[in-house]
Amino acid sequence: GDSVTQMEGPVTLSEEAFLTINCTYTATGYPSLFWYVQYPGEGLQLLLKATKADDKGSNKGFEATYRKETTSFHLEKGSVQVSDSAVYFCALGTQGAQKLVFGQGTRLTINP
Amino acid sequence: DVKVTQSSRYLVKRTGEKVFLECVQDMDHENMFWYRQDPGLGLRLIYFSYDVKMKEKGDIPEGYSVSREKKERFSLILESASTNQTSMYLCASWTPPGGYTFGSGTRLTVV
């Protein structure tokens, strides 16, 4: 079945550091890929998405590129801020299914 | 913007009680979902619904049921709450062109 694997956390960085959170997937067909973010005490919010191979999703300085050849959708940010501290979830949705499969989440803490 | 509203942010219930968690969306979406979130386990799908009065089991339906009498409302029911159902519960609505809109979550503690 479809699955998503994220790098294990927690991840702790200093402010202005470069961030990468790895995400790989297994899916039949051609999934759409998503990153969601959950700030403390809140539900999940869509951060960015990509619907086909080589698409790049971007938002709030975060980027992720849909790599079909490596089945990956790694999240990157060039310079993180304390306000980026949150839990990040990678997810996939297969065409027509209208249902997402999530990775286990990666907790990110940014220290000033 | 789509809004998904969960009626309670925090609930404390006793073992054996029947518990109702309510979720309402305001955009006439057909597909709605209930997940629970636990540390180290990520999000696990409990039940989902494709339309009024339709429901399908997710990955962990045991101990839960759902109700969808109106399109905008999707309720999760714990028939007899147990301590292992202490968790964060998240409701989501499938939002075109793709992806979920989540509610703020209900943190349920069963004592």
Image: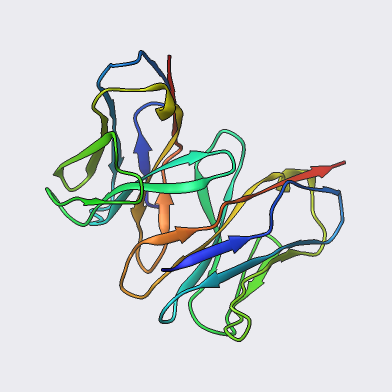
Relative vertical location of residue B98 with respect to residue B22 in this rendering, above or below: below
Residue at horizontal 40%, vertical 29%? B85
Q: How many marks?
A: 0
How is the model colour-coded?
A: rainbow
Return the x and y of residue A33 as percentages of the image width and height. Answer: 51, 70
Residue B13, x across and y down, in percent: 37, 16
Residue in the foreground of this view, choosing between B20 and B7? B20
**In this view, B1 is above or below B10:** below
Residue B64 appears left or right of B42: left
Q: Look at 46% across and 74% down and name the residue there.
A: A27
- Tell me the quadrant of the picture where the C terminus of chain A can be found: top right
Q: Nearer the viewer, residue A36 or A10?
A: A10
Q: Is residue B7 left or right of residue B73?
A: right
Report x, y in % for residue A60.
Answer: 67, 59
Give the residue displayed 71% in from the left and 49% down from the top.
A9
> Does B99 sit above or below residue B13?
below
Left or right, A95 with reference to B105: left
Image quadrant holding the N terminus of chain A, namely bottom left
Q: Give whichever of A109, B27 is nearer the camera.
A: A109
Q: Residue at x 36, y 34 (%)?
A: B6
How far from the left and from the top, in percent, is residue B109? 45, 21
